[in-house]
Structure formats: C-alpha cells, structure tokens
Amino acid sequence: MDMQGNYFSLTLLLFRVGNQKLREYFKTQWPIVYQRVRPGTVPPPWQDTPHDAAEMKKIQPSKLKFKFKDEETKFNSGNTNDWDFSLLTSVLRYSSLQFVLPSSPESKALDDLKKIRNELIGHATDATIPNALFHTAWTDACNALALFNASATDFKCVQDDVNKPWNVLYPMLKQCVEQEKEIKDSVDTGELTPC
C-alpha cells in the first residue's frame, strides 16, 4: 500500500470503526456507571437526547471539562452520533464517572488511539504515513479497538474499502471525517489526491 493509502486506512479505522465502537461501548457502560453512582436505581438507557447529557452532568461527582465550546454544545445534545472522536475519547477517559478505570487496558487503549489520531492523522500536513510507521500504528489501533469490541471483520472491511476506486473511496472518507474538522478541512481543500 502507498503512503496515502496508509493515511486513508487509519482515517477509516479510527473515524468509522473507532467512533462506532466507542459509541457502543459508551452506551453499554452507561447503565453500569449510573448504578455505581446511584445504587439500586434502574438506569435509563442512553437515548441520544439532551436529557441524557443533563442526567450525566447531574450525577457526575465532578464537572466534565471541555477544551472547546463546540465540544460542550455537542455533549449537551446527548446525541453520541454527533460526538467526534476527541469528544468520545475524552468522555470515556476523563469523566469522573469512570467509564474506563485509569489503570485499565481500555484507558491505555484510548490514550494510544488519541496519540495515533493526533500525531498521524490530525496533524498530517500531506495526508501520508510511511509504511513502517503505518504498520506499527495499524497494529496498535486494531489492538486498542479490539478492547472495544471491534473485530477482524471490521479491520478487513477497512482494508477492502481502501482498495476501492477513488470515486467510491473519496465520498467514504468525506463522510467518515465529517465531524473531524481539521481532517475534513484537509479532505475538502484537495490535499488528498486520487491513488
């Protein structure tokens, strides 16, 4: 695979597979963390509404901090489908409700995913990743996402998609980075070229 294909692979892996699996994980952990704070209470399922976000804020021992105003707006919507990768990882990793425990494998996995996102995708100036770096990052990302129930089938689907014709791949990339502003900007400005 060429260096641009490497970039596309990690982009699809983190923002399509990763976001989906992190959302699912959040929703399955929600009743568990809710009952930890309110023992004996039947937790309401997370329904992607503003009420859900308000309830989470109400039961948190300490306030969730947001880096940017738009993150708080997205969080307050309660709609996890609108939460980007950074917001999902922050809520899971840094919420005082402890969706993941600080010393858990899941916590390290979130740190690894965030590092890959920031260093190789989010701040890539030319939308390429050298092969040696890619292979390590791909393995690390797959291992991390496996802790959030991603499967070998999910990973193969990404690899198959990257080999599709440009006119099929490009819309997929644009759709999966729609919430990731800085990455979307690089896709929109045409920095990516057909393979």
Image: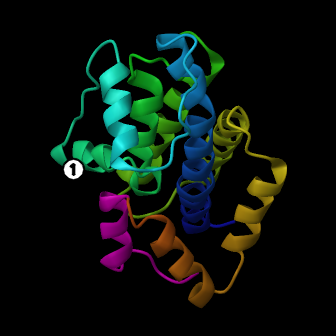
Q: Does the magenta run of residues contain 20?
A: no
Q: Residue at x 30, y 59 (%)?
A: 182
| Res 41 visible | yes
Element type where label 1 sits in the image? helix
- Which colour style is shown? rainbow
Quadrant of residue 165 within the rendered picture: bottom right
Q: Residue at x 35, y 80 (%)?
A: 190
Residue under label 1: 70
- Measured from the top left, where is residue 168 in percent x and y? 61, 86
Quadrant of residue 95 within the rendered picture: top left
| Res 102 visible | no
Work out whether 89 lies above or below 174.
above
Which residue occupies the foreground of this view, 182 or 44?
44
Q: Residue at x 33, y 47 (%)?
A: 50
- Specify the quadrant that holds the C terminus: bottom right
Query: Which segment is the magenta one?
Result: 180-195
Residue 73 falls left or right of residue 173: left
Question: Hey, what amino acid is under mark 1?
Answer: Asp
